[in-house]
Image (cartoon, rainbow, N blue to C red):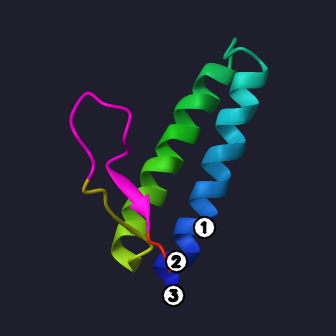
Amino acid sequence: MFNRLTYRFCETLGYLLCELAFKTNCRGPFAYVYRLGCWFYGQATDAGVRCGELVENSAFYRGQAEPFYIRRTR
């Protein structure tokens, strides 16, 4: 339960921070906002794997556009 809550919170916060940085072209302090958003995305990935929300993608090949983890289909 806690991992799922952490996953949702960190994914949302990471998305919002990265979008804010993109809207401002990552200028000045917003370059650090982008880094912070990426850190929150990393925390969301870890929590998502622990709670079973994210699973490994069998179609993943290094160097291609497929993500390593995908959302579990229900």
For marks 3 and 1, give the CA distance: 11 Å
* Extreme residue in the bottom direction: 1
Query: As displayed, is residue 23 above or below residue 3?
Result: above
Assess disc 3: are there few (<14), some (14-19) or many (≥20) residues with their C-alpha within 10 Å of its C-alpha.
few
In which image quadrant can residue 16 be found?
top right
Query: As displayed, is residue 30 above or below residue 47?
Result: above
What residue span does the magenta drawing correspond to?
A: 59-71
* Image location (x, y in percent) of residue 66: 37, 41
Q: Are marks 2 and 3 in contact (CB under 8 Å)?
A: yes
Instruction: Tell me: 54 left or right of 60.
Output: right
The amino acid on which the numbered mark 3 sits, given as a three-letter code, is: Met
The amino acid on which the numbered mark 1 sits, given as a three-letter code, is: Arg
For this rendering, which residue is in front, 1 or 52? 52
Q: Are marks 1 and 2 in contact (CB under 8 Å)?
A: yes
Q: Secondary structure at mark 2?
A: helix
In which image quadrant can residue 31 be found?
top right
**Residue identifier under label 3:** 1
For marks 2 and 3, give the CA distance: 5 Å
For marks 1 and 2, give the CA distance: 6 Å
**Residue identifier under label 2:** 4
For this rendering, which residue is in front, 67 or 41? 67
* Image location (x, y in percent) of residue 49: 35, 68
The amino acid on which the numbered mark 2 sits, given as a three-letter code, is: Arg
Image point 25% across, 56% down: which residue?
Answer: 58
**Residue identifier under label 1:** 8
